[in-house]
Amino acid sequence: MLIEDALNENCVDKSVELKGWVYRKRNVGGKIFIVLRDSSGIIQCVVDRGVVNEDSWRQAEEITRESSCIVEGVVRREPRAPGGYEVKVTRLKTIGLSAWFPIKGTEGVDYLLDHRHLWIRARKMQAIMKIKHTVLEAGREYFNRNGWWEVTPPILTGSACESGATQFEVNYFGQKAYLSQSAQLYLEALIYSLDRVWSLTPSFRAEKSRTRRHLAEYWHLEAEAAWYGMEDMMKVTEELVSYIVSRVLEEREKELKLLKRDTKILENTLETPYPRIKYDEAIEILQKKGVKISWGEDLGADEERVLTEEFDRPFFITHFPKEIKAFYMKLDPENPNLVLGFDMLAPEGYGEIIGGSVREDDYNVLYKRILEVGLNPKEYEWYLDLRKYGTVPHSGFGLGIERTVMWIAGLDHIRDAIPFPRFRERIYP
Amino acid sequence: MLIEDALNENCVDKSVELKGWVYRKRNVGGKIFIVLRDSSGIIQCVVDRGVVNEDSWRQAEEITRESSCIVEGVVRREPRAPGGYEVKVTRLKTIGLSAWFPIKGTEGVDYLLDHRHLWIRARKMQAIMKIKHTVLEAGREYFNRNGWWEVTPPILTGSACESGATQFEVNYFGQKAYLSQSAQLYLEALIYSLDRVWSLTPSFRAEKSRTRRHLAEYWHLEAEAAWYGMEDMMKVTEELVSYIVSRVLEEREKELKLLKRDTKILENTLETPYPRIKYDEAIEILQKKGVKISWGEDLGADEERVLTEEFDRPFFITHFPKEIKAFYMKLDPENPNLVLGFDMLAPEGYGEIIGGSVREDDYNVLYKRILEVGLNPKEYEWYLDLRKYGTVPHSGFGLGIERTVMWIAGLDHIRDAIPFPRFRERIYP
């Protein structure tokens, strides 16, 4: 039986057996109060010397924080206890006695990262992981309910998708290979078979800088569809984000509350469409607000944060200068200095959670773009083939799962959106 | 509109617009027959010189195999056409004229792997990918419907889970890191927070041998649960496999038929429990059937194939000698030369699709086992910690997605269970 099921009026005066870990313990005059935790919550268990047998009393005396145990007892109402109920213990059995637990919760960031395998037991971490569970489930459900096909693109690849500078190199049977930065190029190949495809895979970026929103390894929800234009694909991303947020609001109320998340802006997010501004307008807004930026420069975390002040829900920036975006984005037919790309930014300072675009579908233009950005067309031979054998207009996007969780859960730093974060110099545990 | 929706009595005499690629084309006396394909199926489109305008006729004459196009026309019954209906074309517009398509389908394995980005368009590959879609969806649904928590364990790790010999090494900001062979050790850490967890991640094994059932990169569905014993966990795997197969039988009938899959044994699979034999019995059976094997030797693909002849559904082998299994498996209290491990083998010669076990939860025993197998306890410090701070009895398993797809789809070789297979020397495309 889970603790949350015992915290229930129907259980009052009933016998229960609970399995969990000691979250807190204190001795008060002949009684030992053990707060037990499991995946579902916490409950107060009262061991009364006058009630339990000698063996259970001795075990209650000896048991330490984070020990695992099995508790039998009777549920009763107790307004002062967390959740409003407690267990009057009839029997306590320690299963795994814990050594002195090395975490209080007040330690510094690096210490907690060194003890991450233990710190993930914290109620805050538990709540975030549950929110992530729902984000992942809802994201996939959106695609499956709408008739998209899930595919499994490769992680080990022979060439770069985004940028050679941030690639991790793998010794692949003596050859050089790289960890995927994005499944996009492979998803593009797959639309010729399945029309509309999506994947959820780890992506890797060897980012040298430590920031609040970069991980070296993150989960990437990507989609690609034949015959979809810019507006079609932006609509997909709006519906997707709105669906994810609605599911989290429905199913993770308890966890959002535990994290003290103000949900007003999340509720705004349910309503689509989201506002759209062009890169040109973004630059104007920034300049008006005193940010030093010129047309043609990329928007970093700082600029994005300033822009989010203008909106009370996610919003799009579109039509970027081609120089600051990837070679595969389709040039805007109305202004070939721009690309038909879009970013979706989360409000409240969070910034980019989705990047997408129409893809260049013309063989000659794409070939020229590859040369222009200094890449070797030979390495993109198979990708170019897709424009040679029945090319179609198509679009796609990628959503960063941890950035989305970070925003929805209202986290300060992306490291807590993943149980074992990987970034520069952090590979343990 | 998708082709499968047009192949419908309700569409007869109605106008439709279809988007797709030219699957086949032939000219027969003033008429051009184009078989169009999309993700949902194929349909015959008849372009009649006397009906369409000059422009559409010219495009129909020029269009090549694998070109993308938009077809407008009227659906009519045609018993001789695939699916029983055809489209009488009123307008044809070529979108992406294809160069001469370099695949007929009769080429050799290596040629088709070199052209994998194009070969995935084949109807057989499409059918397999759709089956995989359903396998993935059903696998996750099983866990989510039963209250397990999805988690995202790391892919980049500092130490080995299974065997150092088959690890891929990554240059991680100048340090050595490895690609995960299994999420298990991390899932074990996570049960202390979430009780019952699962993950779906790519796993990597630098297998030097080329076999019909090994990939260097494959998808791994893994689960771990606190308080679960051997029989509890075997029951989970049975229910999981039965649920996956039931969903494929329900939703992928068309694809199984296209692959000419005999589904009798898949139907047997719906009924649980599956037969269980111990390793001892497996050796006896093999010896009786004339296979040269002694007690203590590991079962390879050949031995497994012989054993599958004895069963008409999946079955378990349990209680292996500890020498042939991983250090983390719990020793059998009734015979400490054996481990409480289990493999589930798919019938029809396919062999192992699941490996699982009870995990060693005693700090001292685990420490000793790590030394026994020649590993360095220092590298497993965080993993040993899990036995120090509130250890619990627990069990888990991993299911190979591609092996499961290979069996369910009845494939000869595992390479076709993944769109871009990775194995020794194969990294392109």
Image: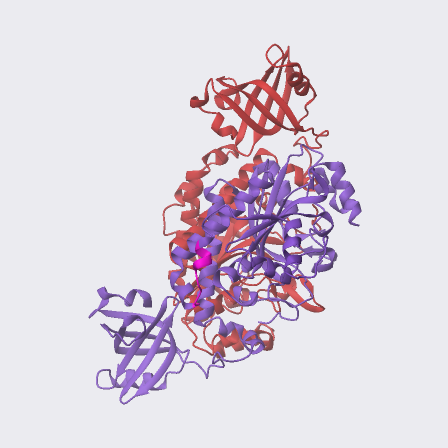
Chain colours: A purple, B red
Q: How many marks?
A: 0
Q: Let me know if residue A292 appears in the view.
A: yes
Q: Residue at x 24, y 82 (%)?
A: A52
Q: Is residue B102 above or below residue B185?
A: above
Q: Is residue B284 above or below residue A124?
A: above
**Closer to the camera, A315 or B265?**
A315
Q: Residue at x 41, y 52 (%)?
A: B142
Q: Let me know if residue B275 appears in the view.
A: no
Q: Residue at x 22, y 64 (%)?
A: A10
* Residue B368: percent from left, percent from top: 53, 77
In magenta, the rendered stretch is A259-267
Quadrant housing the C terminus of chain B: top right
Displayed quadrant of residue B107:
top right
Q: Residue furthest bottom?
A: A29
* Residue A120: percent from left, percent from top: 48, 70
Q: Is residue A379 left or right of residue A194?
A: right
* Residue B176: percent from left, percent from top: 68, 68
